[in-house]
Image (cartoon, rainbow, N blue to C red):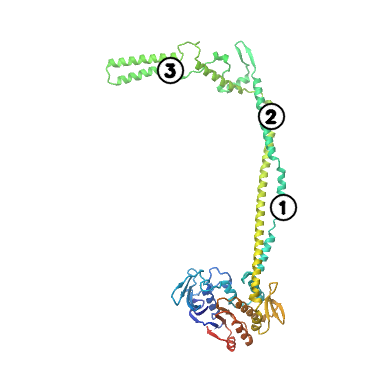
Amino acid sequence: MYFSKLLLKDFGKFHNREINLKPGVNVVYGTRNAGKSTVADFEYATLYGIGTFPETEDDDLAHHKPMDEHGFSGKAYVIKDGDEYLVERSFRKHNMTTQVLNVKNGRVGKLKHKNSLYESLTGVDKKTYSDALYIRQQKDTENEAEELNTFVTNLATTGSSNLDKRRALAILRDQKNALDVTETEQQIAELKEELKQYDGDEEALKEVRKKIADNDEEFAIETAKRKREARRLIDTEKGTKYEEDDELNEHLDSLQENSVFLDADLLKDYKAPKKLTDRWWMIALTGLLVIGVIAALVYILPFDDGVRQLFVVCTALFVVMTIVDGLHRKGALDGENQAPSEEEFKKIVYELERKNEAYEDVEIDMSFARKYMDLKEDLRATEAEILERKKQKAQMEDEIRVCEGRKQAIEREIYATTLAINTIQELSRSYVEEWNYIINDHMTDIMQRVTGGLYEDAKIDEKLRLVIKKNGAFTDITQIDATDLPLVRMAVRVGIATRLCKEHMPVVIDGLPQMNNTQMQGFFASIEEIPSEQILILTDDKQLVSKIKDTKSTYALTNLS
């Protein structure tokens, strides 16, 4: 796969700029700020798009948006397995579009991943391409050697340059060490020990409530006994009656419904109050009222005088007979000594019995009740104390449940952290085995050619450090001469690209270190081993271009200036 033409319609400083490329090595020359990195980023953006939320700083390509705001787009012709495709993109944040057109048959392909050609035109994912096949310029920093070591060891242990296994493990171990259940377990043990003091409270509560019930029962029995004793009877001339007592009479007066003496022998002294409708004068008055109403109606209606008089007389006789019969039925005509009917007698007896029951409320000397009241008060206080202890116990049980929940949460977090550590270690071992193939087994020739024999080999040691071989001995990357670091870095990156390049994907090398003729020839000899159909080299070193010509290598030159 390779690019045959780039059309930077509106991208960075370019407007409608066309760049023709060929398979093999393509050298793009331009002075500083001519737009070399912009061309490299355009190829990268054509393949994988511009993310709204870039994963890394290198993926943040939104700064290439033109300042004039006219547009943000471009096209590229891509050759894949002999077929030519036109990839047209709009990079505007709110209008990102990608169209892949097969130039030969005119069909528009569908993307399997939004905004990316991954698994549509290429099987190489964005992260692999960025780490292995897009060799960017080395930024000037004080720790360039350590950054290279981090880059390589991250790839070796996690498969990604920006995933630091050692840092991740350190963070996880710190988190795990901070998760300690000892304090929580101790707190639970102390609470459970303190909870033992409440054992037996339920039985004690049942016992005190039984004592309260027994006390109430004894008080009721004693009260009933004293009431019976209070009803002292004496004989009088009139028969048996209750002893006259001013205090008793005062109490009885307050009982409105119990104002008569209760004894069957006093029935002759008892007169039941009459209803208003049972009084003879009310009955007579009602009869007269009926006669008057009838007479008025008769005189209002158009009857003859004889008929009216006859009607009034008959009505008067009927009313009188009705009144007499009613008085007879109610006993008004029977005299004072007439015995009551059976129904009236039963009613009187019932009322007397009811009043007799009510009379049991006679006041008695309640001084004896003090001991019962004092005992009950003490028992109630004991009950309240036990109930308060029950509340305290419930609160303590709730606190134990909270502590146990916190302990379980900590244990789950410890388990998850341990699992994460073990998973990272397991994945890391598989990557390390793979990286024996990627870097450790083939760097000798590449390192010697690119550095012109200054260094002999490179590998990752058992401590996961990048070490470089010089004069037969390996030394840590941070210990080599700083002036040699750009050459060593280029050799390592070329070695990684050689093993990770798949599907003949295009390789981009943005910037070359200073090289002599020997090193330049070794560099070109090494990149020719990369299984890629196209290698794009961007440089601003004019002398370097002359040295490239001296290598007699085949390449296409594009001058951006």
User: Looking at this view, is 51 or 252 the one in front?
Assistant: 51
Label 1: few (<14), some or many (≥20) within 10 Å? Answer: few
Which of the marked residues, 1 or 3, is nearer the chain's N terminus?
A: 1
Q: Residue at x 68, y 80 (%)?
A: 457
User: Which element type, helix, strand or loop, lies under badge 2?
Assistant: helix
- Tag nearer the camera, 1 or 3: 1
> Would you say the residues marked 1 and 3 are in contact, meaning their CB atoms lie under 8 Å apart?
no
Q: Splitting the image into 4 quarters, where does residue 285 fall?
A: top left
Up the image or down, 521 lies above or below 115; here it is below
User: Which element type, helix, strand or loop, lies under badge 3?
Assistant: helix
Q: Taking 343 as reference, is 461 left or right?
A: right
Up the image or down, 227 lies above or below 475; here it is above
What whole-number distance in Å separates the C-alpha atoms at marks 2 and 1? 48 Å
- Tag nearer the camera, 2 or 1: 1
| Residue 385 visible, this angle | no
| Residue 306 visible, this angle | yes
Q: Taking 256 as reference, is 198 left or right?
A: right
Up the image or down, 541 lies above or below 388; here it is below
Q: Residue at x 65, y 51 (%)?
A: 402
* Residue type highlighted by circle 2: Tyr
Residue 407 location (% of width, % of height): 67, 54
Numbered label attached to residue 282 = 3
User: Which element type, helix, strand or loop, lies under badge 1?
Assistant: helix
Residue 114 location (% of width, % of height): 51, 68
For disc 1, the marked residue is: 186
For disc 2, the marked residue is: 372
